[in-house]
Amino acid sequence: MAAPATTDEVHDANVRYHDLAAVHYDAKWGIDYGDRGQGQVIGKLRKALGEPLLERFERGLEIGAGTGYFGLNLTRAGVLGEYVGTDISPGMLDKLGDSARRLGLDVDTACCDATRLPFPDGCFDIVFGHAVLHHLPDLEASLSELRRVLRPGGAIAFCGEPSHLGDRLAEIPKRAAYKISPAWRALMRASPAVHSGYHEAPEEALLEQVVDVHAFTPRALAAATRGAGFDRVQVRGEELAASLFGWTNRALEATAEPSEVPRLWQSYAYHGYIALQAVDRALLEPRLPATVFYNLLLSARAPD
């Protein structure tokens, strides 16, 4: 059995992986900066914070901003006044800058590690991120650094973090999809993907096995956050039916050449996912424990 990767190895793998992913990231995940994208992002942030109405945050910091999906949409929607995006990947931040210029947004970026943020104490009203905490090898040190740069009473909000059980449950539809993928491709009249099983280059697929270092239980994630000095800590679950449906479809699509997947299928996959999000939100999320959902949403406040 290979020895676990060191912190430096995980850091270097994350930089390389996300630099490679930046080239096709927005297309792969269907990133949108219109009403659809803003609605998705605002809904997730509102759910994470557990507040019926979002306050406006005058100065916001995004950790692991990537190409800017969360932060740019929140800025366009008026939820953020000033937006600063950070990432360890220069390639991701280049794409973020390109999108900001195209959208006519004035934003700041910093290429830095979450454990060493180049900002003074207490200078942000909110620190947030999407699908980033599970990439951080030293979660406790990162959370302490987030606490340092927050003003008293400031908020953190992190969405899209994989739960330990949810991550295991997601393997079921993925395995089933790969088994039926030849029949599905025949029905779609699509050729097998050049890199079978994934659209990424082989190096990117190998690095992906290193960069995902955590899958959380709600209790452990809450405990780490309290240990960093936060209060009013809440961990919620998001997406069960939608995630199972979505991972089935993504696993099928990953076996085919992307340009040959029919638009009718893409429309079905998107609208089906949105419909099941509504089912999750109305029926499952209020009733089931957070641990069974694929995504965990974390929020907390710095002490006043």
Image: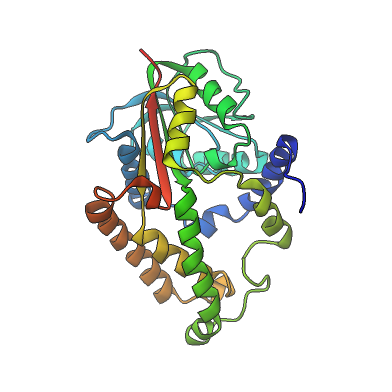
As drawn, is 216 to the left or to the right of 284? right
The answer to whether residue 106 is above or below residue 240 is above
Considering every residue shown, the one lying at the far front of the view is 1
Residue 33 appearing in the image? no
As drawn, is 283 to the left or to the right of 47? left
Please report the residue visible at 30 percent of the width from the left and 61 percent of the height from the top. Answer: 276
Please report the residue visible at 68 percent of the width from the left and 70 percent of the height from the top. Answer: 195
Residue 11 x, y percent position in the rendering: 69, 38
Residue 219 appearing in the image? yes
Please report the residue visible at 72 percent of the width from the left and 44 percent of the height from the top. Answer: 4
Front residue of 46/236: it is 236
Please report the residue visible at 65 percent of the width from the left and 43 percent of the height from the top. Answer: 91
Residue 279 x, y percent position in the rendering: 26, 59
Residue 66 x, y percent position in the rendering: 56, 42
Residue 225 x, y percent position in the rendering: 46, 28
The answer to whether residue 266 is above or below residue 98 is below
Residue 126 picture quarter? top left
The quadrant the C terminus occupies is: top left
Front residue of 23/211: it is 211
The quadrant the N terminus occupies is: bottom right
